[in-house]
Amino acid sequence: MPNAYAYVRYSSTVQSSGDSVDRQISPLKAFTLETGVEVVETIIDEGVSSFRGDNANKGKFKEILARIDRGVIRSGDYLVVESIDRITRQRVLDGVELLQGILKNGVKIYTTIDLRCYSYEDPAKDFENLIMISLIAKRANEESEIKSKRRKSAWNKAKLAASESGKKFNVHNPPYGYCYDAETDKFVIVEEEASEIRMIFELLKTMGVSNATRRVNTNSKRKWTGRQVSLMIESKYPLGMLMSQKRNENGKKIFIEYIEDYYPKIITQTAFNEAVVSMRNRKDRKHYGNTTIGSTNIFRHVIKCADCGETMMFEKQTNQKGILYPYFNCFTRKELKGQCDQRFRFDLAFGMLLHAMQAITPEPRSVIRRFTYTMNEAERKRWVEVREAQSPTQGITYKKFQTDPKERSERRAGMDVFGNDLNSFLADDKNLQETLGKELAAASEILAGLKGTYENYEKSVAGLDGNIPKIIVNNMNKLEVDIDNQSELVDKLSGEYGASVTEIKLTTYEDVIERFSTEKGRLELNQFFKSSGIQFKFRYDKVARGLHMWVSRKGQEILSVSGKFPLHKPLARFGIQRLADLYEQI
C-alpha cells in the first residue's frame, strides 16, 4: 500500500501569519478520499524560497530528496503539493531536471490545485507531462524574477534613503540589542541585550570566541554562537553601522558600504578595535599555550624553552600516581618527538615567579626565607656545578657588567618595573590625572573612529573594480590627514598622562598569589606580561631537580633565578599546600 507525503512551503514570515499554510493543507483530505492513499506526514518548509533552489539545497525539501534516494520514500508513494511551484521556481531546465529526478525514482507528484498526477509509469504521457511541467515552471520562474527585481528596487531605494537621510527601513527585524520606537522613528538600545554584547567584546580581549560565548551564555537572554559573534563583528552593527550588501549574478551577497550612525552605538570604536586586534593576534599566533579553563596559564604566549628557544606548551597530564597536573612541554619535545627533553610542572614555574618577586621586594635580610631541601651526593654535586657561575645571594643572578654602568643601571630599572604593582596606579595630582585620562580616552576614541571610517572606505573601494568616485578619493585623503593629526594628539596626551602617574611597588609575593586566586587576576597577570614585553625562559635540570628562570623585558635580560623545590608540596614555603586549590574554584 503506497503512502503519501505532503510538502508545504512558504517563503516569507508574512505568509506564515496568513492563510498560506491552511490553503496548502486543507485539500489533503480530498486527496485521500479521491485516491484512497493516506497522507502519513506533512513536511513544512518555513520561510524558504524555491526561486534559486534554496529549499532543495538546505531546506526540508532537501531531506525529502535524501529520503527518496535512500528508499525511505518508496517507488509508488505520492508527493502531494499545492502546485509545482511549491517544489521549484528555478529556471525551466533546472526545475525540470529536479522534477524528473523525483519521477524517475517512481515517486508520483500530485498537485491539489488542479487535481493532476504526474507519474513515470505511463510513457505515453511523457511528452504531455514535460510540456505541463515546463510551462508551470516557466510561469513560476518569471513571477519570482519579477518579484525579485521589485524587491531589489525597493530595497535599494530604502538603503539609499537610509544612507542619505537616516530613514529606517528594517524596523520589524532590528539586530540583537535594539528595538524600534515608532513614536520617535528611531532604534533604541535594549540594555539587557546590549550588556551581553559589551561583555563579549570585553572578554574577546583576553580569550577566544568559544570561551567568551560559553561565559556569556551562563546568564544570557539568547544562546550565543561563534557564527553570531563573527556576523556581529563583520556587520559592525554594535558600532551603530548598517552594512549594505547586494547579491551578484550568482546570488552571493557582496559588500557595498557601511552606513554610519544608523543605530545608536552599543560599544565604542576603541573597545571594538581592541577585541578585533586581540582576535587577529590569537589567530595569527606563532606561540602555543591555549587559554585553559579558569585561565590557569598566566605565562601564555610569554614563555620559552631556554635550551632551544622554542615555545613551551601548556597541558594537563596525569602523573604516575594518577593525579592530574598542569605541565609545560617544549614544543620540539611535544610536536617533533624528542628533539628537546624540557618538561616540568606548572607549579614550579609559578614558584619561580614567587621566588623572584620575593627576592626583588625590598625586605630585611632577616625576613627573606631560603629554600630548604635534602639532596643526595649526586644531586649536590650537580647542583654545585650549575650554580658555579651564579651569585649565592638568594638564588638571584645579575649579569655582570664590568665596564658599562649605564647598562647595569638600565637592568636594575627593568627589575624595578617587573616588581611594580601590575595594575595599581596612583596620581600625584589626582585631578590632573583624571582630567588627562578623560582627554586621552576621548582623543583615542576619535582616532579609533577615524581609522574605522577609513577602513570602511577601503572595503568599499575594494568592490568598485578600479572605478573609484572622486568624492571617495577626496574623503580618504582628508581622513589620512585627520588620522595623522589625531595620532600626534594621542601621543602627546599619552606622554602627559604617563608622567602624571606614580607606580606603586608590589609589597610581597602574597599579592601575586592573591591575583592568581581569581580568574580575572590571572588574566590581568598574563595581559601585563604580554603588554609590557616581559618574557620568561626556563630550563629544568633533571639530575639536580632544579629549575632556572631568566626574565627579559623588551629584549633586555633583567634577572635570572635558580631554585630547587621539594618533590611533594613544592610551594608550601609560600603557604600553598596545593596550587590547584587556587584555580579549580570555578
Image (cartoon, rainbow, N blue to C red):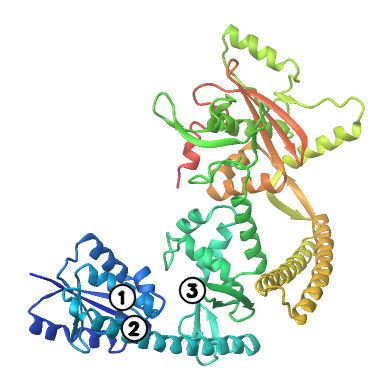
Q: Nearer the viewer, residue 382 or 423?
A: 382
Indicate the secondary structure of the residue bearing disc 1: strand
In this rendering, is residue 157 above or below 442? below
Residue at the location (74% across, 22% down)? Answer: 393
Nearer the camera: disc 2 or disc 3: 2
What's the amino acid at mark 2?
Ala
Circles 2, 3 touching at the beta carbon (< 8 Å): no
Circles 2, 1 touching at the beta carbon (< 8 Å): no
Q: Label 1: which residue?
A: 45
Ranked by sequence position, the earlier of labels 1 and 3 is 1
Residue 571 appears in view: no
Nearer the camera: disc 2 or disc 1: 2
Q: x%, y% of residue 321?
A: 40, 24
Q: Label 2: which residue?
A: 137
What's the amino acid at mark 3?
Tyr
Indicate the secondary structure of the residue bearing disc 2: helix
Q: Label 3: which residue?
A: 176
Locate residue 114 relative to residue 325 in the image: left or right.
left
Q: Nearer the viewer, residue 407 or 581?
A: 407
Nearer the camera: disc 1 or disc 3: 1
In this rendering, is residue 85 above or below 383? below
Q: x%, y% of residue 484?
A: 83, 67
Ranked by sequence position, the earlier of labels 2 and 1 is 1
Question: Which quadrant holds residue 310?
Answer: top right
- Label 2, label 3: how far apart the Cα atoms are: 38 Å
Question: Which quadrant holds residue 159?
Answer: bottom right
Graded by Cα atoms within 10 Å as few (under 14), some (14 to 19) or many (20 or more), the crowding at tag 1 reads some
- Label 2, label 1: how far apart the Cα atoms are: 19 Å
Label disc, if present, on residue 317 of the rendered structure: none
Locate residue 398 relative to residue 582 in the image: left or right.
right
- Label 1, label 3: how far apart the Cα atoms are: 25 Å
Ranked by sequence position, the earlier of labels 2 and 3 is 2
